[in-house]
């Protein structure tokens, strides 16, 4: 009764190495590029028209960017920002998935925590930063804690939603086999929730960057946020914008990496276009 | 699970569940009270470091700071900035989001720069714009508006995507004008998602308000909190933190209620209050 | 072997009270293939869920070899209407999972899985993923997976309901063959009369809501049953008899709704 020919490469839904195309942005219509090009052109125009030195033109920004890279500043500060940020994100991931799964599988945990999470979400957790500084001193630690705190929300929210949406039959079958709870969670609940977890991670990643940048702009002497403030203070507007471009690029690359990871890890959902 | 033997324990379990379902705030409030109680106890026993105040102290501080007029102006000033930025950014985002959703050619042109600028942490734009305009209120509101633009834009646009084909065909069948279709079909259909975007945007406006006050010598509640830490005035610090949190919560709840009213009859996208 | 004693199930949703089942008393003997038939909404699936311990009855009790059934167990294997295989594992690993979950080694589990896949006629498709298979093949794999639990009873919840008519016919014959070889006790829920008559040793007809046992009819068709059986006059007679009885229940259901 074979209907699908298994050797048909279109049908094989397993591990196929991503082609270059899936790494690059999907080639949208040229209209999108037109919009960007127009935006850049406007900027350039604005910059050259106004003769105050405060709006650098694109060439100047690029030169500054190259300079930052060559001098090693970019690597030094960027590495620090990324390092601290990713630690915070990792903590948020572990805690968030655990809490989200707990909420998704246990009604009481859900009833207790969900209103609390929804209530505390709109409160700017940045306000707690001074308290973290008091607890952990200045430096990387309060930043990491704040990143973890901010990023844990989208991860919990998405993990919870995903855990709740697991098809009933999958859960019932796992209970049918009388497998122990840990086994069921790891073999069934976790893989089934994986797509949602990755979505949460995609949302959390830019939050991580934002928090790092903000905290590095306040009384800190290292990191990309500091670079921006430093450039502004030394009247180097091109420097400011060059770091902004780096940040944008970073955010974009991280996002694409996550999309790639999702494609590999959630190999069974071929339909999803991200 | 016979009818007789199982009744007593099964009954009490069911009634706990009834309480939890009918009054969903009971359990989380209980959790909060337990945590607050433990915190208070720790303070009472002297286990807390001097920069962590007891809940009762914090409440007392808030009251006295309100009474003596310290908090009031700070809150108003910060709120004004946040809400102004929120209003501007959301309005622009809403309109553009809808327009780009319905018109492919316009959509792609605008979408290009928006998508490209999306990964930029908007807070990084604050010093950039400050280079030109200086660290003042105008800049702050602009940055807040910029940040608030994106969630509403993306969500409103997304809201236009899921409109059922039949609704669109209905409009065409009735030979309704473009404006009429837009007003009576597109806007209501996109509203639930757009409101989700609004709530995200509101939360964002508070964060940005805070961040812009703290960077570069601002005024308002946020900067007061930070300065309080430096000066060791833990009373003002904690009072400020709690007040900001409360304001954020209340504003979000208000928006949720308003949103529910506006989208009566439509299911909100799984976003719980 | 499997007994339902005075089973009743009432659903309460806010202000609505729905009595799905009432006073169900049934006995399923070892090796028997029982089909449960009834109009839509008669609580057939609910009864099956209760038999398997997935849902709790409001009144009454289910016993398996005289011990009460209160939660899902490996002895009562459930086959769902949508095969519900794990999409992230290939067929072989899907069928192997219940054995691994029970503490078996991976090698042993895969070996048994391959045997079971052979039993259900899926040789050669071990490495395929569920998304790559047709509905009928997925259902076979689901049956193999449930067999991997080593159950005493197979509970089947309209397993062919989602398949097209042609595949359904073939799957019925396949299931009959598999059952002949394994001789398990089966409780099979369906709304298709021919299916119930072809597969079952007996057919239990539930009434309209609240579901009660309206009739319990033995099917006197020779075993083993195959494509030929489907053309036999005896099958047609049983079909007509049941259709008339079912008709009464459907009319009652519509009258109740009116």
Image (cartoon, coloured by chain):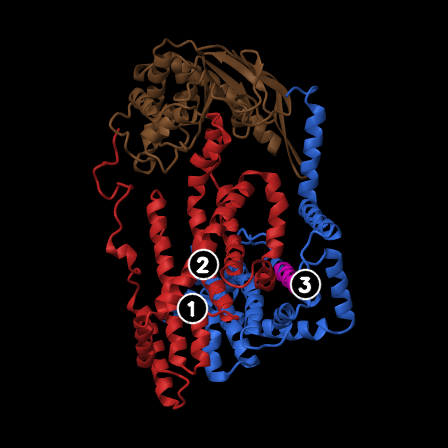
Chain colours: A red, B blue, C brown
- Residue A193, image x and y in percent? 45, 43
The boundaries of the magenta stretch are: B238-258
| CA–CA distance in space, label 1 to label 3 | 29 Å
What residue is shown at x 67% (from left), y 56% (from top)?
B49
Crowding near the residue tagged with mark 2, few <14, some 14–19, many ≥20 C-alpha atoms within 10 Å? some
- Residue C183, image x and y in percent? 39, 12
Q: On the rendered structure, is C224 left or right of B17?
A: left
Chain letter belonging to callout 1? A
What residue is shown at x 66% (from left), y 68% (from top)?
B232
Q: Return the mark for residue C199.
A: none
Q: Return the mark for residue A224.
A: 1
Residue B86 occupies quadrant: bottom right
What secondary structure is the stretch in magenta mostly built from?
Answer: helix
What residue is shown at x 62% (from left), y 23% (from top)?
C8
B19, above or below A120, in the image: above
State the residue position of label 3: B238
Q: Is residue B171 magenta?
A: no
What residue is shown at x 39% (from left), y 28% (from top)?
C97
SS state under label 1: helix
SS state under label 2: helix
Q: Is residue B250 magenta?
A: yes
Query: Furthest residue to the bottom?
Result: A51
Q: On the rendered structure, is C150 left or right of C108?
A: right
| CA–CA distance in space, label 3 to label 2 | 26 Å
| CA–CA distance in space, label 2 to label 1 | 12 Å
In terms of sequence position, does the residue under pointer 2 or pointer 1 come before the other? Answer: 2
Crowding near the residue tagged with mark 1, few <14, some 14–19, many ≥20 C-alpha atoms within 10 Å? many
Q: Return the mark for residue A84.
A: 2
- Residue B3, image x and y in percent? 68, 20
Chain letter belonging to callout 2? A
Callouts 3 and 2 on one subunit = no
């Amino acid at each position: 009764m074979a209907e699908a020919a298994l050797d048909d490469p279109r049908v094989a839904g397993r591990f196929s190495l991503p082609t270059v195309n899936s790494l690059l942005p999907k080639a949208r219509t040229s209209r999108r590029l037109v919009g960007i090009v127009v935006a850049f052109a406007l900027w350039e125009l604005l910059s050259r028209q106004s003769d105050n030195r405060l709006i650098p033109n694109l060439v100047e920004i690029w030169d500054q960017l190259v300079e930052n890279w060559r001098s090693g500043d970019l690597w030094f500060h960027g590495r620090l920002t990324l390092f601290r940020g990713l630690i915070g994100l990792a903590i948020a991931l572990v805690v968030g998935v655990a809490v989200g799964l707990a909420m998704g599988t246990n009604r009481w945990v859900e009833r207790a925590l969900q209103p609390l999470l929804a209530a505390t979400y709109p409160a700017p957790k940045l306000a707690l930063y001074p308290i973290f500084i008091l607890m952990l001193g200045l430096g990387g630690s309060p930043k990491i804690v704040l990143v973890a705190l901010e990023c844990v929300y989208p991860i919990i929210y998405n993990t919870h939603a995903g855990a709740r949406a697991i098809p009933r039959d999958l859960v019932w079958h796992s209970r049918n086999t009388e497998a122990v709870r840990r086994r069921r969670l790891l073999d069934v609940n976790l893989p089934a929730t994986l797509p949602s977890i990755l979505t949460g991670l995609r949302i959390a990643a830019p939050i991580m960057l934002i928090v790092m940048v903000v905290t590095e702009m306040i009384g800190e002497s290292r990191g990309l946020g500091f670079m921006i403030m430093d450039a502004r203070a030394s009247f180097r507007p091109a420097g400011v914008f060059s770091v902004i471009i780096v940040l944008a690029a970073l955010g974009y690359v991280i996002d694409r990496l996550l999309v790639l990871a999702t494609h590999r890890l959630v190999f069974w959902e071929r339909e999803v276009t991200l | 699970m016979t009818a007789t033997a199982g009744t007593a324990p099964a009954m009490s379990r069911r009634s706990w569940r009834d309480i939890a379902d009918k009054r969903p705030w009971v359990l989380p409030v209980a959790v909060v009270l337990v945590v607050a109680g433990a915190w208070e106890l720790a303070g009472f026993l002297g286990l807390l470091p001097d920069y962590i105040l007891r809940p009762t102290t914090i409440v007392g501080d808030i009251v006295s700071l309100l009474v003596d007029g310290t908090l009031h102006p700070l809150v108003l000033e910060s709120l004004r900035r946040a809400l102004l930025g929120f209003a501007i950014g959301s309005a622009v985002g809403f309109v553009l989001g809808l327009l780009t959703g319905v018109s492919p050619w316009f959509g792609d042109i605008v979408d290009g720069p928006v998508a490209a600028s999306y990964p930029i942490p908007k807070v990084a734009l604050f010093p950039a714009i400050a280079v030109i305009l200086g660290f003042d209120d105008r800049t702050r509101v602009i940055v807040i508006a910029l940040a608030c633009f994106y969630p509403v834009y993306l969500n409103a646009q997304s809201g236009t995507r899921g409109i059922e084909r039949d609704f669109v065909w209905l409009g065409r069948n009735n030979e309704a004008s473009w404006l009429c279709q837009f007003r009576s079909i597109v806007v209501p259909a996109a509203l639930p998602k757009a409101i989700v975007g609004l709530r995200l945007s509101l939360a964002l406006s508070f964060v940005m308000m805070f961040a812009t006050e703290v960077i570069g010598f601002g005024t308002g509640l946020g900067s007061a909190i930070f300065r309080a830490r430096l000066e060791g005035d833990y009373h003002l610090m904690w009072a400020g933190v709690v007040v900001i949190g409360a304001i954020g919560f209340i504003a979000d709840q208000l928006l949720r209620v308003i949103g529910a009213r506006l989208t009566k009859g439509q299911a909100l996208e799984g976003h719980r209050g | 072997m499997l007994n339902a004693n005075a089973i009743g199930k009432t659903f309460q949703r806010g202000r609505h009270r729905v009595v799905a089942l009432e006073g169900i008393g049934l006995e399923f003997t070892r090796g028997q293939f029982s089909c449960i038939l009834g109009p839509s909404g008669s609580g057939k699936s609910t009864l099956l869920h209760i038999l398997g311990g997935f849902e709790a009855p409001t009144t009454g009790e289910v016993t398996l070899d005289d011990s009460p059934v209160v939660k899902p167990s490996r002895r009562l294997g459930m086959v769902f209407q949508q095969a519900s295989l794990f999409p992230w594992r290939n067929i072989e690993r899907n069928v192997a999972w219940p054995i691994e979950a029970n503490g078996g080694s991976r090698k042993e589990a895969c070996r048994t899985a391959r045997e079971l896949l052979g039993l259900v006629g899926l040789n050669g498709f071990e490495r395929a993923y569920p998304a790559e298979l047709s509905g009928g093949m997925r259902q076979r794999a689901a049956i193999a997976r449930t067999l991997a639990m080593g159950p005493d009873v197979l509970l089947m919840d309209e397993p062919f309901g989602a398949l097209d008519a042609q595949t359904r016919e073939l799957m019925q014959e396949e299931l009959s063959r598999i059952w002949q070889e394994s001789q398990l006790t089966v409780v099979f829920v369906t709304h298709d009369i021919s299916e119930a008559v072809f597969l079952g040793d007996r057919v239990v007809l539930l009434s309209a809501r609240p579901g009660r046992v309206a009739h319990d009819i033995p099917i006197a068709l020779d075993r083993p049953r195959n494509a030929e059986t489907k053309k036999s006059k005896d099958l047609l007679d049983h079909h007509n008899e049941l259709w008339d009885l079912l008709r009464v229940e459907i009319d009652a259901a519509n009258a109740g709704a009116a």
